[in-house]
Image (cartoon, rainbow, N blue to C red):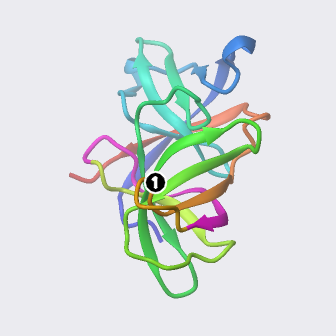
Amino acid sequence: NLSTDYELKYTNIIERDANNWSNEVTINIGSNSDVTNGMAVITSKGMIGTVTKVTPVSSTVTLLTDENAKSQLPDMITDSSNTYYGLLNSYNIKSKTFNVSILSTVDKIAKGASVTTSGLGGKGKSPKGLLVGTVTSFSSGDNATGKTVTVKPAANFDDLNYVAVVKRTDS
C-alpha cells in the first residue's frame, strides 16, 4: 500500500552507452511531458534510478547501479514485524548488490526483508513504497562504518527497455 500519491508516465529507453552501462540511460520523454529532475524511474519489477537531466523531448536517468553516484536514496527495510530506515549509498558491480546504511537502532535484519523507498527527501523526490530489492545480508559493522545491509536489486539492470517515470502528486 503506497502512502504517497503518484502517477506513472510510461516510456522506453532510447540510449544506453556501453561505456557507462551501469551509470545512466536516456528515455524518450522530457519537460514537454512534465518530467523534472529527481523523479524516480521504475520497471515492472522495481526502481532503477532517478532523472538527473531533462531536455524538452528526452531525459537522462542516473541508475541506482551508478558507481559514481553522489546521491543517497532514503529507504525503508521491512521484515515480518518491523520497519527500519536507511540510505542506499553504493552499488557493488562485482556482487551486483546495493549497500544500504542503516539509520535505525537495530541488532539484526533478516535475510529476505523488503527494501522500498521511504518517501523521505521531499516533494519531487521518490514516493514511498517503490520496491528497490531484498536484503541478502546484515552487517553490524564497527563504530566507523555502522550497520549496513546488502540488497539484491528487484529490477534486472541488464534488461532495461520499458520504464515508467514516477511523478509525485502529493503536496
Q: Residue 17 vs residue 63: left or right?
A: right
Q: Farthest bottom residue? A: 81
In the figure, 160 relative to 156: above or below? above
**Residue 129 in view (yes/no):** no
Residue drawn at (44%, 20%) of the image: 30
In the figure, 49 relative to 53: above or below? below
Amino acid identity at mark 1 = Thr
What is the chief secondary structure element of the magenta stretch? strand
Q: Quadrant of residue 138?
A: bottom right
* Magenta-drawn stretch contains 138: yes
Residue range in magenta is 122-139
Residues 168 and 129: in front is 129
**Residue 156 in view (yes/no):** yes
In the figure, 47 relative to 30: above or below? below
Q: Which residue is mark 1?
A: 145
Q: In this figure, what is the number of numbered marks?
A: 1
Q: Position of residue 82 (x, y in %)?
A: 47, 83
* Magenta-drawn stretch contains 129: yes
Residues 162 and 157: in front is 157
In the figure, 126 relative to 138: above or below? above
Q: Position of residue 54 (x, y in %)?
A: 41, 17
Residues 108 and 111: in front is 108
Residues 131 and 101: in front is 101
Q: Position of residue 103 (x, y in %)?
A: 37, 63
Q: Farthest front residue? A: 143
Q: Quadrant of residue 11?
A: top right
SS class, disc 1: loop
Residue drawn at (53%, 37%) of the image: 49
Residue drawn at (44%, 60%) of the image: 146
Residue drawn at (42%, 24%) of the image: 52
